[in-house]
Image: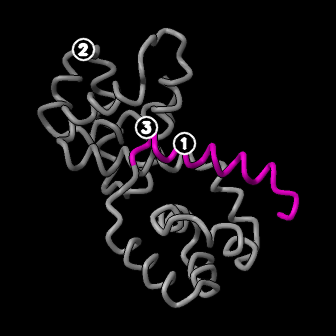
Amino acid sequence: MSDAGVMRSAVLMLTLGEDEAAEVMKYLSPKEVQKLGAAMATLKSVGREQVESTVSEFLTEVEQSSTFGLDSDEYIRSVLTKALGDDKASNLLNRILQSRDASGIESLKWMDAYTVAEFIKNEHPQIIATILVHLEPDQASEIIGHFTDRLRQDVMLRIATLDGVKPIALRELNDVMTKLLTGNENIK
């Protein structure tokens, strides 16, 4: 395994917790345990972004593997829930799966705030809130500034109370956004 692969494995092991990491190490050779242990020891602290990036890479590799004949999102959710507990796994996976499935929404990042505001202002406030949380904060703020006071307040309340979006719902929203954007000739 490459050094980068060992470091990614070390990050994953550190997110598992002691019992789960020990269980995984039972299946490694002594040389692999030594290599992985040394890599884990060099990681003084692991930031949330590094963990998300590593788990996201892991998810991508699992999905691209032709040996899995199952819903990899659900499989990975189940495995990580057992390893990390409900709250940690849910929060981490929702962020990773959402960012991975946001390509249609991602295209809004390249548009000016007024155009995006005009494009989404007639959507349901919950849909608007979901879209805005996937944009950069400064752009979302500018977009909100183009709404009526009533819509602005409704959307801001929904953003403040938004408790994550299921990956399948985000995927559907993303597909709709992609279709709307490719079919709308006024969007530049």
Query: Which of pointers 1 and 2 lies earlier in the amino acid sequence?
Result: 2
Main SS of residues in magenta: helix
How packed is label 1: few (under 14 Cα within 10 Å), some, or many (20 or more)? few
Element marked by disc 1 = helix
**C-alpha gap between disc 1 and disc 2:** 39 Å
Q: Which mark is residue 8?
A: 3
Numbered range of the magenta stretch: 166-188
| Residue visible at 51% across and 81% down in the picture | 151
* Image spot of residue 133 (x, y percent): 49, 66
**C-alpha gap between disc 3 and disc 2:** 17 Å
CB atoms at circles 3 and 2 under 8 Å apart?
A: no
In the image, is 128 to the left or to the right of 93? Answer: right
- Give 61 or 139, whichever is nearer the viewer: 139
- Give 151 or 99, whichever is nearer the viewer: 151
Query: Which of pointers 3 and 1 lies earlier in the amino acid sequence?
Result: 3
Give, as a three-letter code, the residue at label 1.
Answer: Glu
| Residue visible at 19% across and 43% down in the picture | 86
Query: Which of pointers 3 and 2 lies earlier in the amino acid sequence?
Result: 3
In the image, is 14 to the left or to the right of 141? Answer: left
* Image spot of residue 52 (x, y percent): 42, 48
Q: Is residue 126 magenta?
A: no
Q: Which residue is mark 1?
A: 172
CB atoms at circles 1 and 2 under 8 Å apart?
A: no
For the C terminus, give its image quadrant. Answer: bottom right
Image quadrant assignment for residue 10:
top left
Element marked by disc 2 = loop
Q: Which mark is residue 27?
A: 2
